Image (cartoon, rainbow, N blue to C red):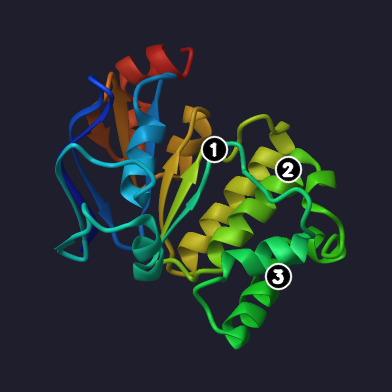
């Protein structure tokens, strides 16, 4: 069953089109991946799904109901959470306070439960819980960004470039965490420039060029696609 259906979606920056009629389905409990070059519209699509950017046309349906005109806050309450590109921590707050901020729609008991879950998923955060988020390494900040998004107990987790700027060992750790979350039942939509690593774990994958999805298939299918191999895998 499709948790999210995107139909002829458009979005503009002024008069400049960033999304040009995107069609996509994000199936429940699956890991869907979007790859493409810089400027292709990947982040714009993710921000339009989360409600941070307005759509100028088309529709986004969540569990069959249109959410195109809902605010980002209402989408969080529906079960959509985004981990933005660049992590966007609250650097002057502690690790634990960053997590509490992520649970602003939840009860005190749910926040406590969410923090325990975050520390189980990323044990290093427990040891750093009293430290300021701005003092963490890049990899630790990425873990915190994911953990903060999980505090809202999302049904759809939007991950924008989680491997950006990280060493290969940390990238592998982040991707293992993503797979673990999927195994726990979280539906994940991943935008990623590290196409090879992303496609290896994808159930469904899309390629975006100039605001349009131009290819789709399973992760293995796109890994074997000559066009993808030449353009995104350097093969």
Ranked by sequence position, the earlier of labels 2 and 1 is: 1
At a point 30% along the width and 62% down the height, the residue shown is 28
For disc 2, the marked residue is 139
- The answer to whether residue 137 is above or below residue 179 is above
Name the residue carrying label 3: 120
Give the x, y percent position of residue 64. Answer: 15, 64
Indicate which label's residue lies in the foreground, 3 or 1: 1
Please tell me whether mark 2 or mark 1 is closer to you in this view. Answer: 1
* Residue bearing the label numbered 1: 85
Distance (Cα) linking label 2 and label 1: 13 Å
* Horizontal side of residue 99 vs 222, given as left or right: right
What crowding class fits label 1: few (fewer than 14 Cα within 10 Å), some (14-19), or many (20 or more)? some
For image coordinates 59% across by 55% down, the residue present is 146
Q: Foreground: 40 or 192?
A: 40
Q: Position of residue 114 (x, y in %)?
A: 61, 75
Q: Nearer the viewer, residue 69 or 195?
A: 69
Q: In the image, is 49 to the left or to the right of 171?
A: left
Disc 2 crowd rating (10 Å Cα; few below 14, some 14-19, many 20+) is many
């Amino acid at each position: 069953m499709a948790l999210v259906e995107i139909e002829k979606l458009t979005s503009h920056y002024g008069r400049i089109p960033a999304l040009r009629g995107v069609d996509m389905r994000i199936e429940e409990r699956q890991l869907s991946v979007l790859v493409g070059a810089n400027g292709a519209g990947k982040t714009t699509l993710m921000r339009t799904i989360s409600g941070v950017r307005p759509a100028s046309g088309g529709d986004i349906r969540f569990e069959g109901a249109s959410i195109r005109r809902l605010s980002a806050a209402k989408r969080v309450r529906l079960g959509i959470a985004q981990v933005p590109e660049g992590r966007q921590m609250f650097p002057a707050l502690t690790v634990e306070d960053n997590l509490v901020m992520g649970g602003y729609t939840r009860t005190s008991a749910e926040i406590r439960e969410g923090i325990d879950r975050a520390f189980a998923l990323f044990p290093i955060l427990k040891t750093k819980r009293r430290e300021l988020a701005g003092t963490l390494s890049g990899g630790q900040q990425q873990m915190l960004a994911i953990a903060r998004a999980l505090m809202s107990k999302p049904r759809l987790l939007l991950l924008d470039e989680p491997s950006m700027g990280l060493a290969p060992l940390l990238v592998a750790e982040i991707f293992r965490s993503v797979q673990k979350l999927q195994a726990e039942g979280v539906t994940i939509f991943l935008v990623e420039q590290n196409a090879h690593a992303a496609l290896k774990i994808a159930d469904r994958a899309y390629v975006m060029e100039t605001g349009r999805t131009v290819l789709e298939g399973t992760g293995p299918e796109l890994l074997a696609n000559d066009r993808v191999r030449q353009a995104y895998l350097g093969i």
